[in-house]
Image (cartoon, rainbow, N blue to C red):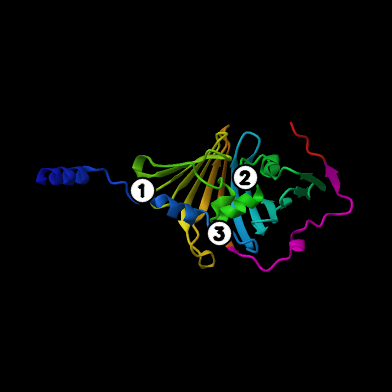
Amino acid sequence: MKYLWLLFFIVCACAPKTGLHQTADVPALWAQLTPPVSHSEQVLAHFSLHIQGEQQTGRMVGQLWGYPSSVMRLDLTASSGGLVAVIRESDNVWTAYLPSQNKAYHDYEAQKGWSYFHIPVPFNVRQVSNLFIGNLGEILYNEYSKASTIAHQWTRLEFALGDVAFLEMSPTLDVLVFKGRSGWVLTCENPYSLEEFTGKQLYAKYTFVSVAGEKAILRLKSLELGSNWDVADLDLHLPDNVQWMRILHQ
């Protein structure tokens, strides 16, 4: 019997250490990354956006504000100071106004909103706002199908459904890497915390890379809770002579 205990001790001593992210820890990590959603929560964020691609290269700054669970506004400004576009996104309608052209576009596929401006971000405006406030539930499917420990004690969550194929997390959650089912990659870095968003995992830098190698680097400059806006405050007030344009789908 004593030899069995000795063998048990040797096996346990030699077993590899899995670090913070053992499989048993995954439910707690999942709960941390997908906190309960408050439908009344409002957010105001300012960010810079660097784009590197064949169709567009340059820098813009943005203001994103509204209700992450329902209606959001996004105002994009060129580095030179000119307003590029104002965008309103609800559950099922994306509307964009280009002041320099006095043209407006609307679409029932909000996911197309960023790609219209040749910005390689695979999410809609509301999903990006949820990224900012640490709610990954709006991006990931409602449950992972498999959890495992990979190199350097990182944890991988795999998803059988949804746009994200898997999510990889560093042991201290200082880096998250999403791999899209279609081939895009999102890396979240530079974690920080804010008293207004206690208990949420926040990041200041987001790097999107498309299948074609185009890149969008988004750096968050400020993030705060909203100011009791009404939904009507998020409306686009367009000129009477605005020209409405149709978006053709391929």
Quarter residue 10 falls in: top left
Tag 1 and tag 2, C-beta contact below 8 Å: no
| x and y percentages locating residue 95 in the rendered image | 76, 49
Residue at far front of view: 1
| x and y percentages locating residue 105 in the rendered image | 79, 45
Residue beneath disc 2: 123
Quarter residue 181 falls in: top right
Tag 1 and tag 3, C-beta contact below 8 Å: no
Graded by Cα atoms within 10 Å as few (under 14), some (14 to 19) or many (20 or more), the crowding at tag 2 reads some
**Of the image marks 1 and 2, the number of the one nearer the N terminus:** 1
The Cα atoms of the two marked residues, 2 and 3, are separated by 20 Å
| Residue span colored magenta | 224-245
The circle drawn on residue 22 is 1
Residue 144 within the segment the image draws in magenta: no
Q: Of residues 164 and 146, which is closer to you in this image?
A: 146
The Cα atoms of the two marked residues, 1 and 3, are separated by 24 Å
Q: Nearer the viewer, mark 2 or mark 3?
A: 3
| x and y percentages locating residue 176 in the rendered image | 47, 47
| Apparent side of residue 94 relative to residue 226 in the rendered image (left or right) | right
| x and y percentages locating residue 217 in the rendered image | 55, 46
| Apparent side of residue 231 relative to residue 3 in the rendered image (left or right) | right
**Of the image marks 1 and 3, the number of the one nearer the N terminus:** 1
Per the image, label 2 sits on a secondary structure element best described as: loop
Amino acid, disc 2: Phe
Amino acid, disc 3: Pro
Q: Classify 140 as above or below 228.
A: above
Residue beneath disc 3: 36
